[in-house]
Amino acid sequence: MRANRIEIAGKCGHNLASRTAIPRTTLQQYCMTTLTFEDFPIGRFGSFGPHHVSREDILAFASEFDPQPMHLDDEAARQSMLKGLSGSGWHLCSIMMRMLCDGFITRTASLGSPGVDEVRWLAPMRPGDDLTLDVDVVEARVSKSRPETGIVTFKSTARNAAGQALCEMTSPIIVGRRASAEGAR
Amino acid sequence: MWFFEDIEVGQRREVGSFTFTAEAIKAFAGQFDPQRFHMSEEEGRNSLFGGLAASGWHVGSVCMKLLIADAQQQMKEAAARGETVAVWGPSPGFRELRWLKPVLAGDTVSFASEIVAKRSSESRPNWGILQAQQKGTNQHGEPVYSVLSTAFVPRRDTSS
């Protein structure tokens, strides 16, 4: 989609430096397609976006999944606690998921997620917002029940163009470890 | 109807059910969660899910859809009886969301919501804060979804 700021290439280059026996094309493909548990050390992972949210996007999602007047009707929204039309919080979370996918998850050995520890909706998402997503790894541990996988917990913060935090999400993802990802090739 | 004072901890409602078709699963995933096991039957079969699985955000959004539809139906009926209907505020968030089992293409999930806690808002005296647990159960009676969600609800005595 849009340009994502991320240092995947640097991470891959570092991690792959010692594995010289694999043909370069395979290495490049591996590097481009698969991030594994080992690629998620604690700390800032990357920042992604921008992702533009139109008024039509907000109305379409709200009509289908969250048809409250504060998400659909300007006048009702003005009188609401949020003082103007705002997107559904579930819409914002879904957009954050899309930004995570575009940012790195679709090229990660992701096996899915058991849930979400916490979501905090801090400020409304408005029509026309250009969202960015800051992603930190807050925990990474090897799974006890499936030792070929690890559980990486991310804290993702969605911000508007002014830098105001709109939503904080803390969520674990199950990620394959490198040995198992290589074994699958 | 449904002001903060009207609501008691332990109140529970079945809010409806939804069948996740393959088409709906792929449409949602294509827009918001294009991981391979949400987009293709074959990739789903080869994943931990064992079949084409709905995005967890799709499941959560459908729960919201059913909660709102149920609430709006009840509000309509209350208004027809001449009752004053509370307009609920936004939610500050949720926690402990669990995707307990995959929701696969063709599954029908029934959702219920139970009030688990209520308290006054310190920062907003006209509002109370409710915590509810929503649960989703599939057609085999297996729990597939659970979340503890929070919402601002207006207080009766200051709502006029």
Image (tube, rainbow, N blue to C red):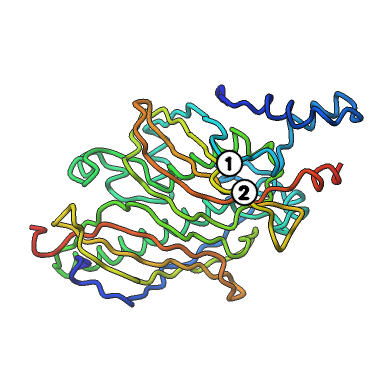
Task: Place residue A84 in its image quadrant.
Answer: top left
Query: In this rendering, do the residues under marks 1 and 2 share a single chain?
Result: yes
The x, y position of residue B95, in whole percent, is 43, 58
Q: Which residue is mark 2?
A: A140
> Image height check: is B79 above or below B94?
below
- Position of residue A60 relative to residue B86, above or below, is above
Q: Mark 1 and mark 2 in contact? Answer it, CB < 8 Å.
A: yes
Locate the N terminus of chain B and report the quarter of the image it occupies.
bottom left
Tell me what residue is drawn at x 31 percent, y 43 percent.
Answer: A72
Question: Callout 1: residue from which chain?
Answer: A
The amino acid pointed to by label 2 is Ala
Mark 2, secondary structure of its residue: strand
Residue A176: x percent and y percent? 73, 48
| Residue located 34% across and 33% down the image | A164
Looking at the image, how many numbered discs can be counted on the residues? 2
Mark sitting earlier along the chain (1/2): 1
Mark 1 surroundings within 10 Å by alpha-carbon count, few (fewer than 14), some (14 through 19), many (20 or more): some
